[in-house]
């Protein structure tokens, strides 16, 4: 263990000097040690993968092979049809607005006319919790309290109510529009001709 620290940190050894100001016979030993330590780290992590993780084959066979492809995509970019994407965005946004309108109608019918729709934001977990469990008085999932319950996909499926089904549909469309389709333009650039 003492031998591992024999070379120390670069700044300790060379007191802030840059590599080009040092004799090569000193620098190559230090650089070789970096390479050696990287290799030792690889061997250590390889052993961890072999001993602890069943997913090793998937990691090395798929994900690491994709690294080159993803890197090239990031550097070169990918082509997408802007006109088609705009039409898709318009269509999905229209579906999203319809789903939101249908959701509001279902909520109004479920809660009654005393419910103020301005208090209902389908994207707010706090407001959804309030709507589902205070105003609609749905039964909390087993083992949950009002404070602990999360209004996630699993909970909404367990509640098995038409409002929850419509809410899941709305959330799916909302994610498609706001995470994927409408964000494509943020990551694109015009091809110069």
Image: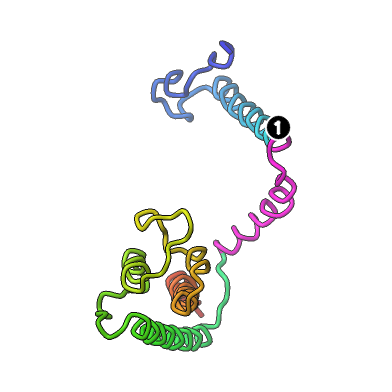
Was residue 84 drawn as part of the magenta stretch in this picture? no
**In this image, 159 relative to 51: left or right?**
left
Q: Is residue 180 above or below residue 108?
A: above
Q: Main secondary structure of the magenta part?
A: helix
Percent x, y of residue 119: 26, 74
Percent x, y of residue 144: 43, 55
Q: Is residue 120 above or below residue 64?
A: below
Was residue 74 drawn as part of the magenta stretch in this picture? yes
Image quarter where the N terminus lies is top right
Residue at mark 1: 47
Q: Is residue 108 above or below residue 34?
A: below
Q: Residue visible at 51% across and 85% down?
A: 88
Q: Residue visible at 39% across and 20% down?
A: 15
Residue 181 visible in the displayed image: no
Q: Which residues are magenta?
A: 49-75
Secondary structure type for disc 1: helix
Q: Residue visible at 53% across and 87% down?
A: 84
**In this image, 155 relative to 38: left or right?**
left
């Amino acid at each position: 263990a003492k031998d591992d620290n024999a070379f120390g940190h670069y700044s300790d050894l060379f007191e802030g000097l840059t590599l080009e100001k040092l004799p090569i016979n000193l620098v190559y030993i230090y650089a070789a040690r970096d390479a050696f330590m990287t290799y030792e780290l690889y061997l250590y992590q390889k052993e961890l993968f072999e001993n602890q993780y069943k997913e090793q084959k998937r990691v090395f066979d798929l994900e690491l092979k994709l690294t080159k492809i993803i890197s090239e995509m990031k550097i070169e970019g990918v082509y997408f049809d802007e006109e088609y994407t705009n039409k898709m965005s318009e269509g999905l946004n229209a579906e999203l607005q319809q789903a939101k309108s249908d959701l509001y109608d279902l909520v109004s019918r479920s809660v009654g006319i005393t419910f103020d729709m301005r208090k209902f934001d389908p994207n707010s977990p706090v407001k959804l919790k309030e709507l589902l469990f205070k105003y609609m008085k749905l039964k909390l999932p087993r083992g949950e309290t009002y404070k602990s319950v999360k209004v996630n996909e699993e909970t909404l499926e367990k509640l098995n109510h038409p409002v929850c089904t419509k809410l899941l549909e709305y959330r799916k469309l909302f994610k498609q529009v706001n995470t994927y389709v409408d964000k494509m333009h943020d990551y694109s650039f015009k091809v110069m001709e």
